[in-house]
Image (tube, helix red, strand yellow):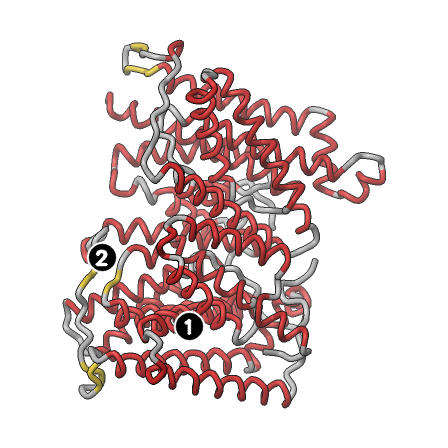
């Protein structure tokens, strides 16, 4: 059986240096966006999805667990943040915390249930759980059903940062994304991350070495779900609404697609994939349902010919770990 | 009481679809090691095929019952020959991703041409009307769907568990290399198995066309429920899939009567309970 990511290179000082250089390049490019004339709303949206995809990738790329319900964390955090901001009138920083806490709680519950099965069953269970949540949110009064929570006040973060100004909001989202990205990078390169990779490569051997693999996978699930919730909470400020689309299975599918296009188990892949897919949706919006057909075709092409993804192919060609 | 019996019947009908679809998923998973995410889309294609046959070719329901599964089954076999077979030896998850992509393509194409609203498909003349059973009024078509599905399910079970062909199939599931060494064309068997599973899905689609309207997304949400059914029942046994499918349909029907708010979620809640009590599923072996 070929593992999901077939060439894992050891983390060498050179690899670390490459990754840090790329990270700085990415940060500088992102910081320059407001001066470039690129529509900041697009980049903010892409950043939220990039963080979501990175969180998803922590689970699939490093833990070997394909969650087909990651939208539930984003949607739950979005609803809870939106409710806290609008109804409880909390300041933005606390609103984000409420969203993260909700995603954290949800990931403990869903993780406890879904981690009991492996492989393909795990994917089906996460999908079913997210569908269960979708129906709950459809009927719960606080989500306002089909309308969603709209007109969410953006407010002043820490009392000084006026988030209704696009540039201020952009930098807040950017800093949030970079912080989340660095946290994931740190997790991957920690002893915990190394154990996780060993489980992905060969679980029976990891067990025989004395690791309680279920606990590692559970923790990875919680970290991934909570970070996905962070992305969902940030997205509330960008979109100023929280709706059912964020919990729907098609959103979970899009996250999978972003990560697959960028490269499963690569550090920068999900970011590239998220920007590519969001840009595609933006430019092809006028084609209606053909966007779904194109997304489906990308899935098929990626799986059949391009399993390493964009960044994965690059990394393979240059023998680097990116 | 009338309403309770009516909901039980609706439950049995949904249960027939769950049984036919989860049966197909189990057969395909056994041979190809793939969870066929496109199953819902192929079920939808079955319903559309019946619609096309009637409206473009003037071919009636009874022929559609035979032809639609064959046509969609051939389409499935082409998918297997051109795409799925290249996944042999790769991680199971790639099969899920590939078939998810296929489902998006198929559903997207149909949505483009037919929108999201439903197309009507009339109940055939022979099955119109209803019977008064004393305690309830039974629409003939609905009774027919339940009985016919049950017969098809049992026939599939018989084919796989009791015939020589089924024995080859089960042997090839256990050890394809050895079965090939005995001179049996395993790749062709894999293709036919996929066609069989897809045909069952299309058959469920034809059966559902007169009940639920023919819509491009009719299978999209259904397949997720069927996944939950498969998780509950496990994919180890054919009979297990059939029984779990029907039982969950009935439970869903009862929920619609006693606590309608939970009718959408009851299958998922049951899945959670089963996972907490018996993680391998009711009939399943460890994955």
Chain letter for the residue marked with disc 1 in the picture:
A
Q: Is residue B159 visible in this depiction of the protein?
A: yes
Q: Label 1 neighbourhood size at 10 Å, few (<14), some (14-19), many (20+)?
A: many
- Left or right, B80 with respect to B226, comes to right
What number is the disc on residue A51?
A: 1
Q: Position of residue B107 (x, y in %)?
A: 44, 42
Hey, which quadrant is residue B70 in on the image?
top right
Circle number at residue A302: none
User: Which residue is at 55% across, 51% downward?
Assistant: B96
Residue corresponding to mark 2: A148
Depth check, front residue: B99 or A84: B99
Determine the secondary structure under disc 1.
helix
Q: Is residue A60 above or below residue B113?
A: below
The answer to whether B136 is drawn above or below residue A243 in the figure is: above
- Secondary structure at badge 2 equals loop
Q: Residue at x 26, y 72 (%)?
A: A237
- Does residue A101 appear in the picture of this structure? no
Query: Which sits earlier in the primary sequence, circle 2 or circle 1?
Result: 1
């Amino acid at each position: 059986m070929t593992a999901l990511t077939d060439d894992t290179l050891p983390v060498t000082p050179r690899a670390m240096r490459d990754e840090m250089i790329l990270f700085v390049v990415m940060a500088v490019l992102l910081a320059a966006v407001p001066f470039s004339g690129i529509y900041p709303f697009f980049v903010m949206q892409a950043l939220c999805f990039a963080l979501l995809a990175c969180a998803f990738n922590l689970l699939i790329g490093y833990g070997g667990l394909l969650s087909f319900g990651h939208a539930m964390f984003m949607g739950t955090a979005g609803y809870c943040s939106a409710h806290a901001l609008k109804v409880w009138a909390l300041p933005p920083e606390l609103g984000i915390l409420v969203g993260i806490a909700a995603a954290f709680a949800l990931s403990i519950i869903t993780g406890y249930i879904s981690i009991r099965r492996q492989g393909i069953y795990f994917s089906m269970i996460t999908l079913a759980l997210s569908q269960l949540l979708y129906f709950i949110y459809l009927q719960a009064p606080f989500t306002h059903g089909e309308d969603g929570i709209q007109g969410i006040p953006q407010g002043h973060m820490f009392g000084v940062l006026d988030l209704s100004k696009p540039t201020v909001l952009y930098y807040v989202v950017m800093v949030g994304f970079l912080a989340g990205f660095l946290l994931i990078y740190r997790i991957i390169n920690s002893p915990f991350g190394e154990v996780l990779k060993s489980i992905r490569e060969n679980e029976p051997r990891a067990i025989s070495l004395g690791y309680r693999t279920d606990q590692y996978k559970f923790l990875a699930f919680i970290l991934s779900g909570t970070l996905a919730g962070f992305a969902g909470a940030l997205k509330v400020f960008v979109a100023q609404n929280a709706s059912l689309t964020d919990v729907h299975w098609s959103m979970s599918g899009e996250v999978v697609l972003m990560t697959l296009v960028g490269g499963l188990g690569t550090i920068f892949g999900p970011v590239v994939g998220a920007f590519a897919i969001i840009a595609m949706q933006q430019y092809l919006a006028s084609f209606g349902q053909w966007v779904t057909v194109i997304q489906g075709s990308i899935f098929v092409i990626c799986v059949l010919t391009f399993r390493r993804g964009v960044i994965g192919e690059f990394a393979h060609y240059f023998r680097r770990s990116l | 009481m009338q309403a309770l019996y009516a909901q039980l019947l609706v439950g049995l009908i949904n249960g027939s679809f769950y049984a036919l679809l989860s049966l197909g998923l189990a057969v395909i998973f056994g041979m190809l090691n793939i969870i066929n995410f496109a199953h819902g889309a192929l079920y939808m294609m079955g319903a559309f095929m019946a619609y096309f046959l009637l409206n473009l070719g003037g071919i009636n329901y009874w022929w559609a019952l035979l032809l639609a599964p064959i046509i969609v089954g051939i389409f499935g076999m082409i998918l297997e020959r051109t795409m799925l077979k290249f996944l042999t030896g790769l991680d199971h998850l790639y099969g899920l991703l590939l078939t998810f992509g296929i489902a998006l393509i198929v559903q997207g194409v149909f949505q483009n041409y037919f929108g999201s609203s439903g197309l009507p498909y009339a109940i055939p003349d022979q099955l119109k009307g209803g019977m008064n059973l004393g305690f309830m009024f039974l629409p003939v078509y609905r009774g027919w769907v339940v009985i016919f599905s049950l017969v098809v399910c049992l026939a599939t079970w018989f084919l796989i568990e009791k015939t020589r062909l089924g024995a080859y199939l089960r042997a090839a599931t256990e050890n394809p290399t050895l079965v090939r060494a005995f001179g049996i064309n395993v790749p062709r068997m894999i293709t036919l198995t996929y066609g069989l599973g897809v045909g069952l899905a299309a058959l469920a689609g034809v059966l559902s066309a007169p009940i639920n309207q023919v819509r491009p997304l009719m299978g999209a949400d259904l397949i997720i429920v069927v996944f939950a059914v498969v998780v509950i029942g496990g994919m180890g046994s054919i009979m297990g899939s059939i029984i779990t499918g029907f039982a969950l349909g009935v439970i869903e029907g009862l929920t619609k009567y006693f606590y309608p708010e939970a009718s959408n979620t009851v299958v998922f809640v049951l899945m959670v309970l089963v996972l907490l009590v018996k993680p391998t599923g009711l009939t399943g072996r460890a994955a």
